[in-house]
Amino acid sequence: MNVAVRLRGLDKRFARVHALRGVDLDIVEGEFFALLGPNGAGKTTLISILAGLTRATAGSAEVMGHDVVADYRDARRALGVVPQELVYDPFFTVRETLRFQSGYFGLRFNDDWIDELLAHLALTDKADTYTRQLSGGMKRRVLVAQALVHKPPVIVLDEPTAGVDVELRQSLWAFIRRLNRDGHTIMLTTHYLDEAESLCERVAMLKEGRVIALDRTENLLRTGGGRRLSLELEPARLPEGLLPRLIGREGERFVLDLPDYGELENTLAALRQSGIAVRDMNLGQVDLEEVFLRLMRQGPGAA
């Protein structure tokens, strides 16, 4: 499979911060990929290097086979970035903004695609509105349209749904899924880990500038133990035999690890034999947020 984004030994030092520490990463064409990490992990620095906004101290970065330094023009044409910050020119309308953005990439007659972007992002009725008059959510939609206006094969979304309403989030992801089905490579950073879990095929997790986990999403979920059994008990205690499986407790509710479904009956039998009644029970899967928190606590070499 062809590689859309390739990072080799990527290292970045600022005056007092070592933001990236020898990052090696391949993202293949057509992949929906998540780059996760806490604040300060190096995600935005990595994206800035890909976009040509900052230079790496060491190592290399390529987009669609184009080095971001030696072949920067083609690398930037191949990349569309939705930044985390709201950056806009207040003196242009939405349509003017997208036309100017098209011009940066040498696209003179791009109105058909601009109209399609406006429709998919629910901006058609705002096309002739000055960007300064838009709400925060609408401005973020314009940023998405700007990133896509030249139809880049690789799209980087840096916290694209931060602070936006549920309706926009759903319509945005429907549109991005369509672009991914059409062959676009998507790289996503987000603090909404449910988005990454439902959308992304593979996940890389950064901590202090290092990749501490890199795998398919389903494989990472398996490392979390699989299932959780939540029980509200009366009296609020566990038999001694179940204590090794205790993960957490809040009042009368206990959360147990459930290695497999066969253990469910054994657990209920142990409670009955101890005279403990089950007032409420909930069985759920481990989610990506739980895996993420565990790996962040463990640090390098955890996965």
Image (cartoon, grey):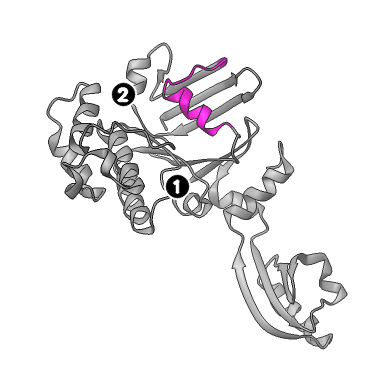
Q: Residue 251, located in which quarter of the rendered image?
A: bottom right
Locate residue 120, reporting x and y percent: 24, 49
Spatial CA distance of label 2 from label 1 is: 26 Å
Q: Which residue is mark 2?
A: 77
Q: Tell me the element at label 1.
A: loop
Residue 183 in view, yes or no? no
Is residue 220 part of the magenta span, yes or no? Answer: no
Report the side of 229 relative to 275 (left or right): left
Q: Which residue is mark 1?
A: 162
| Residue in view at x 44 percent, y 28 percent | 5
* Above or below, comparing residue 271 to residue 159 in the picture: below
Q: Nearer the viewer, mark 2 or mark 1?
A: 1
Would residue 113 be visible to someone looking at this image? yes
Residue 227, placed above or below residue 266: above
Q: Name the foreground residue: 268 vs 109.
A: 109
User: Which quarter of the figure is the C terminus placed in?
Assistant: top right
